[in-house]
Image (tube, rainbow, N blue to C red):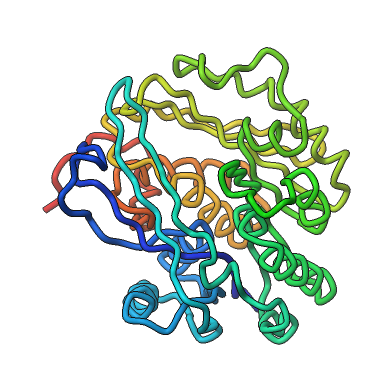
Amino acid sequence: MMNKVVTFGEIMLRLSAPGYLRLSQSNHFDVSFAGAEANVAVSLANYGMKVDYITRLPDNPIAEKCIRELLFYRVDCDNILRGGKRIGVLYIETGSNARPSHVYYDREDSAIATMNPDEIDWKGVLKDAAWFHWTGITPALSENAAESCRRAIKAANEVGVTVSCDINFRGNLWKYGRTAAEIMPELVAGSDIILGNEEDCEKVFGIRPQGFDASKTNGEVNQTIFTSVCEQMMQKFHRCKKMVVTLRGAINANHNTWSGVLYDGKQLLQSKKYDITDIVDRVGGGDSFMGALIYGLMNFEGDDQKTLEFAVAASALKHTIKGDYNQISINEISELLEGNTSGRVKR
C-alpha cells in the first residue's frame, strides 16, 4: 500500500535572536531553517513515513546546508528544483509575558517565488504518492507560485491522491496584486482535508464564530462555537471530508492553552485542552499539528478522535522545542496522551 506523502512550499533561512533578546539588540543569530510544508515533512519523516518535499532553491552553500539538514531528518529531496537567486529569510524575536513574539519576512523574489510553473511534472511526482499537502503560504508568494500550487492540486485530484491544506493566512505576504480571497477558494476547493484557525477562516472566507475574539480569550476557548465555522466551510467546499480547527487561548507570550476540533460533516469531535506554560518556541506549532494529523488519518484506521488527540498532543510538545521542526517521537506523544506530564529525568 502506498503511504508516501508529498509536500510543496518554500523553506527559508531562519535567523532567531538568542534567548529573549530583541532583534535590535542582537549581535548574532541562531541559525536554522523553517517553512510550513518542510516542517510537516520533517514531522512525518520523524514518525517513520516516507516523505518527498518539493521546493526550489538557489545553487549556493546556504541551500546546500538546507538540503543536508532535510536529508538528516530523512526527508526525500530528490525532486527539489535548483534555480533562482536567493533563499528567503525569516527573522524571529521571541516574546515574553505581555510582549509578543515577532516574525519578519525577507522573501521577495526568492527562488520559489520566481519559479516557472512548467518546471514540475506533478503527475510524475505524485505517481507513487498517497497524499499531497500544501498551505496558503505558497500561493501568497507570487502568481507563479500560486499557479504551481493550482497545478499540483489539479494533478493530485486527477490521480486520486488525497489533498490536505492548511489555510495559513499571512496577510503580509500577499503583495503581487491578488488577494487571498481571490486565489484561495479555487485551491481549497480541491482539498479533502482542511485545517485552519479562527483567523484563517475569517480573513480569507469571511467565516467566523459568533462572539469570539482571539485577543480576549484569557486562555478559555469554547470549542463548540466552532461547529458553525466547520459547517460553513464544508458547505462552501463540497470536496472537504474533514474540517479541523486549532484553538489557541493566549494568556501571554509564555502561557497559552491549546486544543482542537475535528468535524466530519456529522459530529464535532473535541480534544483535550493543554495548559502550556513557559513556552520555548510556538512557531511551527500549527505545522506540527498538521504533520501529526496526517499521520493519524493515514495510520489510525478511521479513528478520528485518536487522530485529533494525537495531533494536539504532538503540537503541545512542539511548544517545548526550539526551532521550527517538531523533534518529538511517537513514544513521547503516547506518554503525554497517557497522562505523563511530570517532566522527570529519564535514565
- How far across and how far down the image is residue 262, in percent? 66, 38
Q: Nearer the viewer, residue 338 or 118?
A: 118
Q: Nearer the viewer, residue 139 or 289?
A: 139
For the point 42% across and 46% down, the residue is 104
Q: Is residue 100 above or below residue 182?
A: above
For the point 47% across and 76% down, the residue is 85
Left or right of 144: which side holds 317? left
Viewport quadrant of the N terminus: bottom right
Left or right of 129: which side holds 218? left
For the point 28% across and 50% down, the residue is 16
Left or right of 202: which side holds 312? left
Numbered circles on residues, count: 0
Instruction: Determine the image quadrant of residue 95.
Output: top left
Instruction: Determine the image quadrant of residue 151.
Output: bottom right
- How far across and how far down the image is residue 27, in percent? 15, 50
Instruction: Determine the image quadrant of residue 103.
Output: top left
Q: Is residue 124 above or below residue 102?
A: below
Q: Residue furthest left?
A: 347
- How far across and how far down the image is residue 304, in percent? 65, 46
- How far across and how far down the image is residue 48, in percent? 45, 70
For the point 77% across and 31% down, the residue is 206
